[in-house]
Amino acid sequence: MPEDDLEDLPGVGPATADKLMDSGFESYQAIAVASPGEMSNTADVGESTAADIINAARDAADIGGFETGSTVLERREEIGKLSWLIPEVDDLLGGGIETQSITEVYGEFGSGKSQVTHQMAVNVQLPKEHGGLEGACIFIDSEDTFRPERIDDMIRGLDDEIIADLLERREIEGSPGDDDTMDALLDSFLDHIHVAKAFNSNHQILLAEKAKELARDNEDAEFPVRLLCVDSLTAHFRAEYVGRGELAERQQKLNKHLHDLMRIGDLYNTAVLVTNQVASNPDSYFGDPTQPIGGNILGHTSTFRMYLRKSKGDKRIVRLVDAPNLADGEAVMRVQDGGLKPE
Ligand code: GTP
Ligand code: MG
């Protein structure tokens, strides 16, 4: 249940609060990112009232504040790297995807974006000596893409040495390959993957808020949240804001959403991994099919951008694009039954 009491906002009585809730404006944060026109249309309040409500919610919502340089430095020293377990890709990234950063993986359908999110939900749980961060994963799923069976495949696809180490650490009896043993191992992995489906873009924005609470509540847990996946980041926004006239509003919301995600990354030392399609429709605003949806705003916010391209058979080309302090370059990986593998 939402914690924010909408009736605390000036001008919002019980009836308006109900209307807002029914229209999906369930928290200060959800209201803060709305536009007066949108709220007026969907929640049936006057546009100027809507503007007042939005302004009040912006003041009330947690939108962050200032901190000293030494606090920033301290936090940066904690940055962790999450390995893909593909040496060529890890080399491109200087070790792996970073916590306290947003990594955007974009590419056309079937290029392997969702495979990357699944593999990372496994890898993040591995001990540090095996490239992981001994952390949990939050998975915001906007395309009904999450498959526990695929996690199972990927665990079975890990090196024998890693599996043996995991069984010992997780105090699971039995030997690798044994079905009961592997089922128990799978359960222990699934326990550390928190999945929520996002039904529309507003819901997705709300789920980011929930993700923040979950990361906060698990900060001192055995498996703190070290990875937040959003697959796909843009699909709902793209489907809901279709007209040219809605582009600015879409970008504004997407921008706010990305900053919410970034804030979780910063506050809880979490890697944020988002997927994004490329424009396939030549009539779309971004006619170039090698350009990710969302244009510049997304480009400036995501610290690492990786472009996936299909190649022959199970091969995929991974290209690092515009990363700060890293050279652009390409690597090859394969999408196999056991997960993402080196060439
Ligand atoms: P969209 O979400 O449609 O934009 O695509 P995506 O980029 O997320 O693609 P996804 O990660 O779903 O990759 C799909 C591809 O992964 C398929 O075309 C298969 O080649 C491969 N794949 C998925 N599951 C398996 C599997 O169990 N075994 C093998 N060998 N390949 C798989
Ligand atoms: Mg996908």
Image (cartoon, helix red, strand yellow):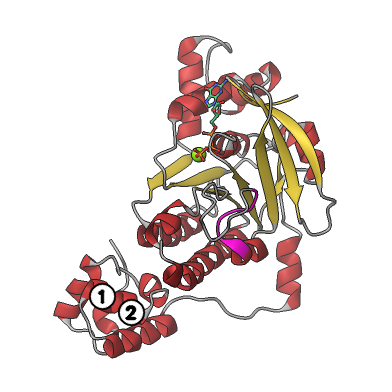
Question: Answer yes or no: do the residues labelled 1 and 2 have beta carbons within 8 Å?
Answer: yes
Residue farthest toward the front in the current orientation of the protein: 283
Residue at 53% of width from left, 44% of height from top? Answer: 137
> Residue 13 at x, y = what percent?
18, 84
What residue appears at the point 51 percent right and 57 percent down from the top-left corner?
Answer: 284
* Mark 2 lies on residue: 37
Q: Left or right: where does residue 149 sit relative to residue 4?
A: right
Q: Secondary structure at mark 2?
A: helix
101 on left or right of 259:
right
**Residue closer to the observer: 134 or 102:** 102
Which amino acid, by three-letter code, is at mark 2? Answer: Gly
Where's residue 257, x and y in %? 49, 64
User: Which residue lies at the image location 54% right of the left edge and 55% below the top edge?
Assistant: 219
Q: Which residues are magenta?
A: 290-295
Figure quadrant, ligand 1:
top right
Q: Where is 68 relative to 128, above or below?
A: below
Numbered badge on residue 282? none
Which quadrant of the figure contains the C terminus? top right
- Which residue in the structure is indicated by mark 1? 41
Observer-nearest of 221 and 338: 338
The answer to whether residue 171 of the structure is visible from this angle is no
Q: Is residue 63 magenta?
A: no
Give neighbour class at mark 1: few <14, some 14-19, many 20+ (Cα, 10 Å).
few
User: Does residue 297 appear left or right of residue 44 in this picture?
Assistant: right
Height in image: 162 above or below 85? above
Quarter of the figure with the N terminus: bottom left
Mark 1 lies on a secondary structure that is: helix
The type of residue carrying mark 1 is: Asn
Tag 2: Cα neighbours inside 10 Å, few (<14), some, or many (≥20)? some
Residue under the image location 57 percent in, 41 percent down: 108
